[in-house]
Amino acid sequence: MKVFGIAGWSGSGKTTLIKALLPVLSARGLRVGTVKHTHHDPVFGTQSDALLATAGLVETMMVSTDRFTLVHEHQGQSEPPLPSLLSALAGIDLVLVEGFKFSRHPRLEIWDSALQHPLMAVSDRSVRAVVSDDSGDGLSGLVIPRFHRHEIMPIAEFIVSNCIPLSELE
């Protein structure tokens, strides 16, 4: 399993980019998975499922004819580190890690000046490239590759060339 991240501030277009990348990466024969960091509670199938979690349930699996999902309750413990979370995935060639913008895995940053957040690539060496359609001063002086949002094939190639094995993840 190899790992590469897609980071950016909320509303920057991380999920939209991943959605565009999936068919390109899959066409290369890769089995792609994602891990997404969220500030919201994962959605339970029913309110009774949520009640089980508050009653002390540690894990629950919801299964349908098309998919299953596994929800693990932290039960007051800290959020597990990214390598621990990724080790729970099976049969995946490439994991796109969405969010986790302060972890140290290689990633690209999606940046939009309209969101008025700082460009992480300026001070974060884990950011290996920037995806932005902006042409403003915020991007001047960058010494890492830059892509426009519509450059899906080159972005996919960059990801495949710069992903790391799970074993190298800190």
Image (cartoon, grey):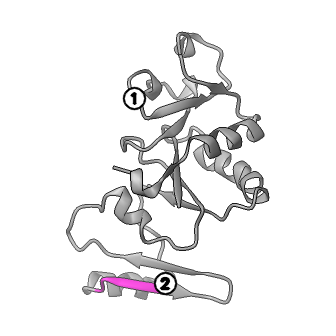
Q: Do the residues under discs 1 and 2 have CB atoms within 8 angstroms?
A: no
Q: Which residue is mark 2?
A: 46
* Residue 100 appears left or right of 74: right
Residue sitting at 73 percent across and 49 percent down? 20
Between residue 100 and residue 129, name the one nearer to us: 129
Amino acid type indicated by mark 2: Thr
**Residue that label 1 marks:** 124
Q: Quadrant of residue 80?
A: bottom left
What residue sits 52% from the left and 73% below the top?
A: 90
Query: Residue 147: x, y in percent?
Result: 67, 28
Tell me if residue 156 comes above or below residue 57 in the rendering.
Answer: above
Q: Is residue 154 magenta?
A: no
Residue 39 in sight in this render = no
Q: Magenta stretch: give its range.
A: 57-61
Q: Is residue 72 left or right of residue 32?
A: left
Q: Is residue 58 magenta?
A: yes
Question: Which of the two discs, 1 and 2, labels the residue nearer the N terminus?
Answer: 2
Query: Could you give the CA–CA distance between mark 1 and mark 2, rounded to whole angstroms?
Result: 40 Å
Q: Amino acid at mark 1?
A: Asp
Where is residue 141 shown, x and y percent of the image?
53, 10
> Is residue 145 shown above or below 36?
above
**Magenta stretch mostly in which secondary structure?**
strand
